[in-house]
Amino acid sequence: MQVPDKKMTKPADTFVDCEICGTQEWSLVYRGPVRDGTYGNQHDGVEVAICGECGVERLEEPSCKDDAFYESGNYREHIDQGLEAQSYYQAHDHLQIHALNTIYPHSLRDLTIADIGCGAGSFLDHVRGLAKTAIAIEPAAHFREHLSSKGYEAYPYSSVAIRDHRESVDFATSFQVIEHVLNPREFLADIRSLLKPNGTLLISTPNREDILMELLPEEFRRFFYRVVHRWYFDQRSLARCAREAGFIIEKTHYVHRYPMANALHWLRDKRPMGNTAIPSIADTVDSFWKSYLEEHGRADTLFMRLRSTSTLTQTGDRK
Ligand SMILES: [Zn+2]
């Protein structure tokens, strides 16, 4: 079964209180194979449920990966990217244009910046000449050594960086990380503790409203859901999580990273072909396709720009 019928809406007992909103109102949205590593490797019989209160979707906990998986080299091996910084750059340097476009026209000049879950530092390398200080937060020890050797202040988690940088960061970024973590609300709250009052956080995550989720509800879902992603957000559920962590939503952007040929290959072959072109499709068609999906919230990636609230509570904490 991939898309449950109405009688099968209750998920397994492993779905307990929602880490974001605290309620226990889970409904099953999917049960079946999910991606387990590179394309073709699957983990069968996995459940995904949606929270009836905050709207987040969650993979069943027994199939998820813990922090140790990311701290060691296991995650990079799992996705077949290798442990070398060079292979990280090969996979990620070309994607930085999307983050930079989303930041534009905001300048990072002379700011203290932090990138949370920065890998080997592709994004930081693109902006370090502008920033006054660049803080690299990355749980994988092998990347952290590399980041330190390049002159970045490196920490495994925001909760550790807080010791040296509480309320000192002007602009934080975290790209394609929140979907992996154990508790997204705490993850954002820790970043908020790093930020100055009214500091900015730009986050991105896969968009659950990706048009292929609708066009191919069976084949694309078993690719979209994966054991390394615990959380699946749309705009509403990500905004709710950010508000719970003490942020104000400033702007939502959608970015579609693939040409129209990617969707056509999916529809024809039922498999991912990345950026493989179809020669007869002109660039102008791709340009329209991407713009259309981004305008209508059906693109593959969801970006959100958040601002740290600055109101002081009676105990002196910001809320
Ligand atoms: Zn919830």
Image (cartoon, rainbow, N blue to C red):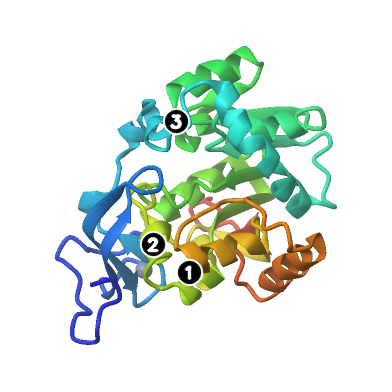
Left or right, 250 with reference to 58: right
Please report contact status of discs 3 and 2: CB closer than 8 Å, yes or no. Answer: no
SS class of the residue under badge 2? Answer: loop
Mark earlier in primary sequence (3, 1): 3
**Residue 57 locus on image (x, y percent):** 37, 66
Secondary structure under badge 1?
helix
Residue at 48% of width from left, 53% of height from top? Answer: 315
What x and y, as percent, mark residue 239? 54, 67
Left or right? Give the position of 121 relative to 112.
left
Asked if ligand 1 lies within 8 A of label 1, the reply is yes
Q: Is mark 2 within 8 Å of ligand 1?
A: yes
- Which residue position holds label 1? 237
**Helix, strand or loop for disc 3:** loop
Furthest residue in direction top, as rendered: 149
Q: Is residue 261 visible?
A: yes
Residue farthest along the bottom direction in this orientation? 6
Q: CA distance from mark 1 to mark 2?
A: 9 Å
Check whether the beta carbons of the residues at disc 1 and disc 2 lie within 8 A of each other.
yes
Query: Mark 3 highlights which residue?
Result: 139
Q: Nearer the viewer, residue 86 or 190?
A: 86
Left or right for 239, reference 252: left
Q: Nearer the viewer, residue 306 or 318?
A: 306
Q: Locate ligand 1 by image quadrant.
A: bottom left
Q: How far apart are labels 3 and 2 at the CA level?
A: 22 Å
Q: Nearer the viewer, mark 1 or mark 2?
A: 1
